[in-house]
Amino acid sequence: MRTFLVFALTLGLTHATYAATFCVSTASELQTALTTAAFNGEDDDIQVVQGTYVSNFVFVTAESFDLTVEGEYTAGCASRVVDPSNTTLDGNSSGIVLALVGNNRVDFVVDGLTVQNGSATTNPNGGGLHIKTNSGDVTLSNNIINNNAANSNGGGAYIEGANTTTLTNNTITGNTALNGGGVYFKSSSTATLTNNTITGNTVSYGYGGGVYFSSSSTATLINNTITVNTASYSNGGGVYFSSSSTATLTGNAITDNTASRDGGGVYFGPSITATLTGNAITDNRASRNGGGVYFYYGSATLTDNTINANLTTNGAGGGVYFGSGTAAATLINNVISDNTANGTNGNGGGIYIYRRDTTTLINNTIANNQANKNGGGIWLELSDDTDSAYLYNNLIWNNSATAQADDLYLNNDANNNFMPSPVEIFNNDFSQSANGTFLKIPILIDSSNLNNLDPLFVDAADYHLQAGSPCIEAGDNNAPSLPTTDKDSNPRIANSIVDIGAYELQVPANSHLQFSASTYTVNESGGTVTITVTRTGGSSGAVSVDYSTSDDTATAGSDYTAASGTLNWADGDATDKTFRVHITDDTEVEGDETLILSLGNTTGGAGLGTPHTATLTIIDIVKNDLIIDFGPSSGIFAYLNNDNWASMHTLSAESLVTGNIDGMDQDDVIIDFGDTYGIWVRMNNSTWVQLHSLSADSMVIGDLDGNGQDDVIIDFGASYGIWQRMNNSTWVQLHTLSPESIVTGDIDGNGLDDVIIYFGASDGIWVRMNNSTWVQLHSLSPDSMVIGDLDGNGQDEVVIDFGANDGIWVRMNNSTWVQLHSLSADSMVTGDLDGNGQDEVLIDFGAPYGFWIRMNNSNWAAFINSANLMVTGSLDSNAQDDVIVSFGAQFGIWAFMNNNSWIKLHNQSAQRMVIGNLDGLPSVTALTNSVMKLPAALENTAFLPK
């Protein structure tokens, strides 16, 4: 077994951080790693090389250190290929595939594995995965868990005692158990399932064909596909909730599941507060009650769901069943259609509600449901005199019942005392055939309800309203719990009065008023920003719209002045209108802050276009400091605030980089002092901390995980390869090879920096994308590479000099190659010299052409004829980068300020220069250096060929 103990063995650091990494490629190596990890007193990461591992693997520990088991690694664990099918743990039907047991608090992570052919018999829980911890966190991601069996609970996976359990992007299929065919959760405080596929699992006698929640206090299911699972002899074909106190289901597809008793799709046990939003619950079957969903007696809120074509073969609630209880049943914006309640107990084809304290149905569409007995659309019974029901704006159409009440069966006096429970029925559309409604105690049906008026659906399977429908603007705006949007997330009140049913007809307005952009930016020192509002879709009629600002992270009064008012367009006027927001400049370092811009209250028949809300970002530009290594005779100095010089160290450096590695407001300086002293960090311009005793071949900075802390990428040479100092806390090897050059930048615009590495002539240029995958950028060898956002779209471009034969090329937006120039460069840097958000490229073409600037990726401008060193950064706290140039011993160091004037900074020449905000301060003083004319000998008068 090859073992990489990251700190103690590989890099030889003197202070261990208690983390071990194992690379395994055989079943015996994997078990040895698990056994070692159980007793080594460290957090452990077991990396499994692609292949098939046939055995029954066990980890049992009394320690409190965390364990990660992750597959998909190539030979030697050099990289990962994201595909869990390439790394298989096979139990050979002889026992649990992988058992992870922590008797104390242990966090477990299982990622990128196929776990199959497990059999839990002696220990009857968790055929594929058996995970037990004492209040630790459990994470399962990107796994395939299939064809496992358990004599008791959790055929695919059994998870017990976790504080937080997270399942993401797993496929759990073909597993069997007594309870929880796919997954069984026991005593988990919080369980979150996102983007999983749970299909074809079965329980032979118990509950929860797909998933069983035993006693999770909070269960959240988001965007999962739960399909073709079976509870052969009991409840919850897809999902079974036993006694979770809170269950939230959002955006799931729960389809074609079967229960031999209650809850074909989902079963909610007692004392559960359930919230279902935007789910598709379709084609599920229950032999008894609740073909789609069964609620025992906990509180339930259903919003924006599609509950369609579910079936009970001999029970109530073909779509949804609510059992008796003191909790409320609330249904808003749902489409409940084509469900069937069959058999002698077949009441409530769409909805069955039994003796709830409060029942609220607002803006639902309940159509084409069937009941073999009573209440084709709705069966509702109220038992106590204080029970209440509110039915507003519902479209109850074309339902059928064999016995009584095609639309609504209402028992409003279940206690038989001739005192009907209070019921409000307003602004609904009923079919109202002769068999339409049953009321045990007759009450007046308000005249606001529509009787037997065809709602004019778009078609038989599309319950949107056509223009001309009698349901348009026929609802009640004062309905309790009236939603702000309809089932499609469109505005619920499109004009002045709400429509009946789940969908609001969106009537085109004469014109639309909207912001010209969804985002705006302004520098904190900018004074004011002008916001533009446009009119589209015609100019007929006079219209107006109100505008306003509101706080997000910026605060009115201290960061900006609140603005509000009305913009007006005359008849025939389609010109843009504007308003201004005043920005307050201050000396605090706050980072970028945002406020919200809003439009509302249109008049003249105009509608709100998109976007009618926007974000204004106030950019907090800070003054960078210049760090210069003047060489062994003078050491390293910092030029702070463009104002004064401060000695940083008497030694000279082999290399320097800057970055915010601790997430504070100040940049830190990472300095390699050579083999004698190693690499040190000047933290927050106050203290020295050794980063490593080894010297580096090269160093770069980038925020690889997008958390706001810069990571340090270091090439330690051929013996050790490339390593990453992540979040100033842990070392992670990036590659075993040593590169020729490295740069970093966010080339896909997702907020995570990518690492662009040239590995040499035999390997070419590769990109480490999002700190997870390797992608080859080019097979040719570059002379040099720099990074910059040349088109200002948030994606960095890679500018590469391929040498004299091929010239300089740009990888635009990580998609296309564009030649910048046929000449090769002596050196290149990038920076936004004019402050417009697009980086310029400064290129030294060498004699006789000198330095030229590629402005805004469109035109060339002559700069200077030669330089020893050059860096860019804003020294004076505006949006424009300045160019700092060391011209050598004869002319010293100069700064080209704001793309228009030169200032001399020092008479000495620099060996190295970097830029960073060491003290976290913005610009608080005026420039103290006098503007000077650059010596004529340094001016560039050459002509650059096309």
Image (tube, rainbow, N blue to C red):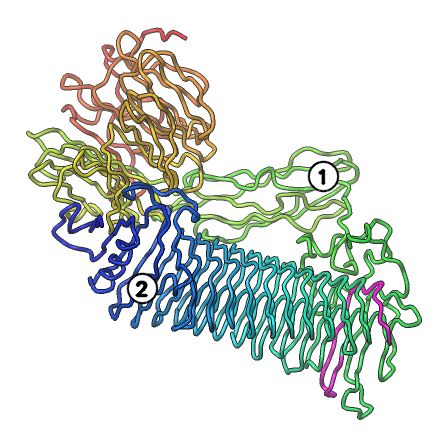
In magenta, the rendered stretch is 381-403
Camera sees residue 44: yes
In the foreground, 427 or 700: 700
Q: Residues within 10 Å of mark 1 (few under 14, many from 20)?
A: some
Q: Circle 1 — which element?
A: strand
Q: Is residue 887 left or right of residue 592?
A: left
* Coordinates of residue 890 in the picture (x, y in percent): 14, 16
Q: Quadrant of residue 74?
A: top left
Distance from disc 1 to disc 2, alpha carbons, whole Å, reads 74 Å
Q: Could you tell me which residue is drawn at 73 percent across and 71 percent down?
A: 313
Q: Amino acid at mark 2?
A: Val
The verdict on residue 400 being magenta is yes
Check contact, mark 1 vs mark 2: CB within 8 A: no
Q: Residue furthest bottom?
A: 417
User: Of the numbered discs in the image, which one, if any, rests on residue 58?
Assistant: 2
Q: Circle 2 — which element?
A: strand
Residue on which the image places disc 1 = 569
Q: Quadrant of residue 77?
A: top left
Q: Earlier in the sequence, mark 1 or mark 2?
A: 2
Q: Quadrant of the C terminus?
A: top left
In the foreground, 900 or 363: 363
In the foreground, 75 or 788: 75
Q: Is residue 374 above or below residue 464?
A: below
Q: Is residue 58 left or right of residue 904?
A: right
* Coordinates of residue 606 in the picture (x, y in percent): 74, 44
Q: Amino acid at mark 1?
A: Trp
